[in-house]
């Protein structure tokens, strides 16, 4: 039985793919759970149109992500921290702190999208990667300086 997947199904394929499955699996599992539809000529045409729309939306999303990446890379953050003897920072600079500084500059970035491997614990200049979209990453220059 040929079916067209409506959603990504593990070990079968991605949404929009036409695949061959056993009749019982298609009729009793995939179709009732709205994971697939029978592969008729009308459904194939409809899926083709949906694919075109998805590609247009994907290009638009990608363009928006690239524009946001350009804006983010123009930003230079300055994080002031309290420092003790021998320029040792009290605490550390985390993705939460960086997110708050970005929000203060008008960029709404979630802390989970800031790809900081480990908290910053010393003064200096850092390049911090920020995930803008699934395959678009911006690098933000961050200065960690002593609080006056």
Image (cartoon, rainbow, N blue to C red):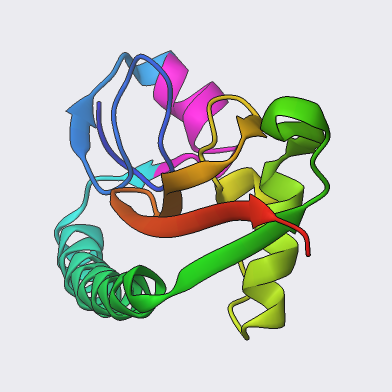
> As rendered, which of 86 and 81 lies closer to the eye?
86
Query: Where, quadrant-wise, is the N terminus in this rendering?
Result: top left
> As rendered, which of 62 and 39 lies closer to the eye?
62
The picture quadrant where one finds residue 57 is bottom left
Left or right of 107 on screen, residue 45: left
Give the residue drawn at x 75%, y 65%. 100
The image shows residue 56 at horizontal and vertical percentages of 21, 78
Left or right of 138 on screen, residue 45: left
The image shows residue 41 at horizontal and vertical percentages of 14, 59
Give the residue drawn at x 59%, y 37%. 32
The answer to whether residue 95 is magenta is: no
The image shows residue 70 at horizontal and vertical percentages of 28, 76
Could one spot residue 110 in this view of the protein? no
As drawn, which residue projects farthest toward the front? 85
Could one spot residue 111 in this view of the protein? yes
Above or below, 75 relative to 42: below
> As rendered, which of 77 and 147 lies closer to the eye?
147
Give the residue drawn at x 59%, y 40%. 123
Above or below, 49 relative to 97: below
As drawn, which residue projects farthest toward the bottom? 106
Give the residue drawn at x 55%, y 24%. 29
The picture quadrant where one finds residue 86 is top right
The picture quadrant where one finds residue 88 is top right
Left or right of 36 on screen, residue 15: left
> As rendered, which of 44 and 128 lies closer to the eye?
128
Q: What stretch is highlighted in magenta?
A: 25-36
Query: Where, quadrant-wise, is the C terminus in this rendering?
Result: bottom right
The image shows residue 73 at horizontal and vertical percentages of 33, 69
The answer to whether residue 34 is magenta is: yes
> How many numbered discs sit on the rendered protein?
0
């Amino acid at each position: 039985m040929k079916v067209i997947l409506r959603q990504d199904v593990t070990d079968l394929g991605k949404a929009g793919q036409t695949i061959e499955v056993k009749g019982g699996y298609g009729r009793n599992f995939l179709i009732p759970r709205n994971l697939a539809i029978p592969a008729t000529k009308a459904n194939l045409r409809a899926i083709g149109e949906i694919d075109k729309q998805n590609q247009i939306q994907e290009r638009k999303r990608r363009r928006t992500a690239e524009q946001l990446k350009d804006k983010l890379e123009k930003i230079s953050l300055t994080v002031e921290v309290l420092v003790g003897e021998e320029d040792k920072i009290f605490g550390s600079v985390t993705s939460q702190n960086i997110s708050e500084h970005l929000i203060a500059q008008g960029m709404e970035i979630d802390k989970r999208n800031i790809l900081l491997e480990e908290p910053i614990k010393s003064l200096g200049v850092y390049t911090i990667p920020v995930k803008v979209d699934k395959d678009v990453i911006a690098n933000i220059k961050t200065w960690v300086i002593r609080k006056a």
